[in-house]
Image (cartoon, rainbow, N blue to C red):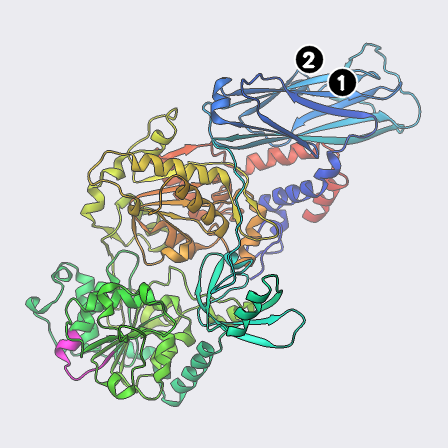
Amino acid sequence: MVVCEICSAEDIGVDHVCSETYRFKYLLHEWKDYKKKLAKDKEGIKISYHSETNILKPCTTNINKGSYTVTLSSRELASVDNQLVFALKVYNDRKEDLIFIMKAAVLVPYEPFHIEDINNMCVTNAVIELSAKTDYKYTIFFRLNKPLVGSYKIPLAFTFQVNNKSKWHAEETNKETRKTETERVEDAQMKSFSISREIVVVVTDFDVVPEEKGKSPFKDELEVPGLAEKRPSLLPGDFVRIRLHEDNTVYRAVVKKVNDTTIDISKVHPQIYDLILKDPRTKLDVSFEVSRLPYERMHMAVDNCVKKKLLPLLFPNEELNNGDIQYLHQIPDNRFYNKKILENREQKLAVLNILNGSSRSAPYIVFGPPGTGKTITIVEAILQIKQYLPKSKILICAPANAACDMLASKLIEFVKDRKEIIRIHTCSRNWKDVPEDVKRYSNHNGTDFIDIPVPQLMSYRIVITTLCLIGKYSGMYNPDHVFIDEAAQASEPEADIAISMLQRNKQLVLAGDPKQLGPHCVSEAAAQLGLTTSLLERLMTTNSLYTTAKNNKFITMLILNYRAHQDVLKVPNVLFYDDQLRAVSAEAASDPIANTCIYALAVPSSSQCQESAVEFCSIMADEKREGKSPSYYNESEVQMVLKYVQKILALSITPEVLESHIGVITPYMRQLHRIKNRLQEHGYKDIEVGTTEVFQGREKRIIIISTVRSKDDLLLIDEKYKLGFVKNEKRLNVALTRAKSKLIVIGNPHILGNTYNPKNQGSGNKNWEYYITFCEDKNAFFGAQYLRRTDEVKDDIINRFSNIRLSNFVNNTNSNNQ
């Protein structure tokens, strides 16, 4: 797939450069290249500006490279009736010559700003003649209806003509004389050029306090620069290579736990501690080595799948669809363990099909969108197999410990005998992370994790562990049924580790949602070869057994959503699930938080809003980053998250909102740390803040999403480093489906939506545009105004730029579009 470097459009054709979006983006691209040069005063012309608004508390101003920035709080802006006035002066510093201001233009019209001049020349486009040592003044007005936090900017351009060789005299000798456009004279002795300026107003509601950076001591914890952005990307079990600077002796340690910016390490050689104790200033060189064990097990699993002739499970024969299935087992209602399944047709059908092996030699897929009870369904199927097939042995796997723990917790509600079920953990896991109810059924003797020998393993009816760990028993353990939960998150070779345990004609059940986050793959080459696609997703997109609508013998889609309010569910339902899901949560529907407009409480001057479970808070404030890190933060959004949290927790509703009910999702680690620190500074220690990956498979009563991005040219960086969810549909889907009763999105609509255009796909995102429009229809869109850049608006901006002397830009644009 070819992606345009200018506008990020995909699958571009020969006519792409003629599209409105490309021409517009190319113009902005060129503008950024020439912007610094245009900002310089030249040819005896000086442009200065200052604020004419008197503010009781002095605001911060900064003049840099042609940009005049005023920073003030929302309270300070409100004190001057939400209006600022700027004076901009063009001064002719030549000794004798006249200069001519041919045009003064706002390049990108923006409603809060308005420009005027003494003789209304900005409207008439008349030429202004300016004598030596005189000036001409423009007034720029900035006004908001209410003091909204954000960053507001307006680019201005002035086009001049000056005498290049000898004196040029006008017919009129007044200080200022005017010519219309038709009276402009082309003269070989005249030189034309442009100078640009930019006015920026930053409205804050906080004082920025520099972060204190403390370094952790080298004991069992090691600070790793770049870890927050997964550079390097480390996992427990990877190796740490430590050596004295300029010494060849290498000591090896093991990564025990990966934190936000540090790692916990174990098995450090005692000599390292001795050396540091002798001289704390000892310089150490540290490098990392990926553990080969998971990859060795994956390679072995693929080989075993071929040797054991299990390829029909990986590449099912599509002719299987032609046969009929005889159901040997029927389940009376009184023999269901979870009686709620009786009220859900799809769940009940999936359990019955799995028990009777309706997919035969092909995998059976439980397609479980968020909140539809996927885990409950497969737990019931496992219990029914145990009940009706008493000699069967069942292996249950998932890519991560959290999913395995969840399955174990639900199964041990009904399987109390410790001789029948076991949860196997790796010895590197922290015992404190294991749920209390699961500990009794784990491979732990009260002091340490213990190895389970094969004969003992074979005695259990149900074994629960991760995909990678079960590879330890390859060739020695042969279950009759393999269940892989969260199968959409596992790479195909990783899933093969569990699949290779099976013998021919045994059962494989895959449960997951290919519309959510898939396998993590760092290598671009591996990604191109398909390792970012799970087995579940490949089957559902390429095999007719699973792509045929409602083919219940091989796949069941769960459609009743027990988690979310109907307004929260609506957007992802339409965008990702063909509007097939049904919201049936009485708890979410009756939750008073769903009918409370939080923005109206956070910003009291805002207008009343309609009751809605979704909100969009529009903030236009630049994101920043530290050093060369690809991870960004947006301080204005951090402050707005805090405001929302404060107002939510202050509500007097039943049931009461607790800190643990709130989750904050942001895709960038720098933003995550800032939000977490800001909340803790205000005493909020139980609010969970995490990335999309952390929240996958989780739910919260209230979810606040901070999107961070405010510059569309940085979206290519996101794609390169796999950051953000502006362009990532699966990450967006996960973020939108975590909330039960209230979903609040904070972001810049011009970047998120950016006017989706079905004709050429624009440069924005149709999914975010749909969410924004949905909030607008619900009267739940707040904050800075969303001015959609239609083709007509883009044409107007292109025409405005064509009036300034942007080097050879105009010619370049025309030649590129031919």
Q: Which residue is mark 2?
A: 119
Q: Is residue 212 above or below residue 806?
A: below
Position of 93 relative to 458 (above/below): above
Label 2 crowd (10 A; few <14 / some 14-19 / many >=20)? some
Front residue of this view, candidates 501 and 455: 455
* Residue in front for this viewpoint, 487 or 569: 487
> Disc 1 on helix, strand or loop?
strand
Q: What secondary structure is found at the residue carrying circle 2?
A: loop
Query: Can I make out residue 740 in this image?
Result: no
Residue 748 x/y as whole percent: 48, 40
Of residues 755 and 390, the one drawn nearer to the viewer in this rendering:
390
Q: Is residue 597 magenta?
A: no
Q: Residue 508, which numbered label? A: none
Rounded to the nearest angstrom, the CA distance separating label 2 from label 1 is: 10 Å
Q: Where is residue 289 shown, x and y percent of the image?
A: 54, 73
- Residue at x 47%, y 78% (from the top left corner): 295
Residue occupying image coordinates x 29% and y 47%: 660
Residue 128 image label: 1
Q: Is residue 804 above or below residue 538?
A: above
Residue 409 falls in image quadrant: bottom left
| Rendering quarter of residue 464 | bottom left
Which portion, as a residue range, is magenta? Answer: 384-394
Percent position of residue 663, x then y? 35, 48
